[in-house]
Amino acid sequence: MSMVPPSLLCLGNLPPPPFTALPGSTVPWKSHVTLLCQGPKQAEGYRISRVGSPEPMDKEEQITSRKTNTLNIAEMTTDKTGLYHCSYQRGGRWSQFSDPLQLVMTGAYSKPSLSSMAGTVVAPGENVKLQCFSKFNHDVFILTKEDGDPITQNQSSIPQDGGRQTIFLLNPVSSTQAGTYRCYGAFHDNPYVWSQPSDPLQLQVEGTTDSPSSTQPRHSTAPSGNLASQDRRLGIWIGVPVAVGLLLLVFLVFFILYCLHKAKNNAERKERHPEAAGQVNGQASEAADPQEVTYSQVNCHVPHQGTAGTPSWVPRQTQSSEYVMLAFK
């Protein structure tokens, strides 16, 4: 019969506190982690211990920092891995121990590979097999799910292609199992020292929010109605500016041709009807449009005083003539 440590005899009346690791209980090598024991405000002291050891890990630290509820680990190493729990003191009594907290160090070995034998997009109810493989002879592989409902599975390995592998089953798969998966390798004699994580595997379940297509069948190559309507709208948005641009270009070409034709006609008219200048009543008059101007010849007879031997009454005709421009409006 196993013996109960004396310190446990005073426990049981006070409820156990929540116990967490920040930023997480899976800690890369030489990274920082903080263990937090969340007792009530009336707590008089705290104790953080490894499972199986009723005394604090560091007696001197626990005595001098009894009022604190945290344990800070500046650099994670293999000797700090394991299972931890905590309790708090109130009214001279210690609470029940918290649930064990598994503190793991990762990065001790090279990463394994993780793949889905049914593909990364599956239908609800399917039997999904996730294969974790490594060239290292790991005794055990660990599968973790990082988002949504987190899960952790440990499973022994078997020999495969010069290395070790194991198959994790998700039977039957549901929407809650969609998310990001990784796997690790470890050994039985040091179960809290893991390898580097595998590359992430994103598992999608059809019909869920994360699924790439919940309205079209799997492996379908035909575009859906939404895609077709989007293509039509895209064609309209592209076609309207192109049509307007072509119309403006045609209008510009016709306008240029019209201007050239009009300039040519004006030049021809100027060559056929050059401008003429004339004076009427001693004032300069400008030539008008050839179609609006009529020229008339006027013969003038001017009487002169008679000279010797010529009668003064005989009119003398001059040979000069003038052109008078008549303008009709």
Image (spheres, rainbow, N blue to C red):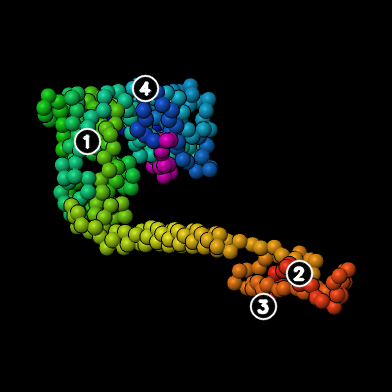
Q: Is residue 296 above or below residue 177?
A: below
User: Residue beneath label 2, please?
Assistant: 318
Q: Quadrant of residue 183?
A: top left
**What residue do we see at 53% from left, 33% from top?**
67
Viewer-side label of 4, 2: 2
Magenta stretch encompasses residue 107: no
Name the quadrant of the N terminus: top left
Label 3's element?
loop
User: Residue beneath label 4, please?
Assistant: 77
Viewer-side label of 2, 3: 2
What kind of residue is marked 1? Answer: Leu
Percent x, y of residue 259: 52, 60
What kind of residue is marked 2? Answer: Thr
Are discs 3 and 4 less than 8 Å apart at CB?
Answer: no
Q: CA distance from mark 1 to mark 4?
A: 26 Å
Looking at this view, is 168 or 288 the one in front? 288
- Pick whichever of labels 2 and 1 is earlier in the sequence: 1
**What residue do we see at 31% from left, 25% from top?**
107
Q: CA distance from mark 2 to mark 1?
A: 126 Å
**What residue do we see at 38% from left, 39% from top?**
98
What kind of residue is marked 4? Answer: Thr
Decide: few, some or many residues near mark 2? Use Cα within 10 Å; few <14, some 14-19, many ≥20: few
Label 4's element?
loop
Percent x, y of residue 236: 37, 62
What kind of residue is marked 3? Answer: Lys
Decide: few, some or many residues near mark 4? Use Cα within 10 Å; few <14, some 14-19, many ≥20: some
- Labelled disc at residue 128: none
Tell me the chief SS of the magenta region: loop
- The magenta-colored residue range is 11-23
User: Residue beneath label 3, please?
Assistant: 329
- Labelled disc at residue 114: 1
- Pick whichever of labels 2 and 3 is earlier in the sequence: 2
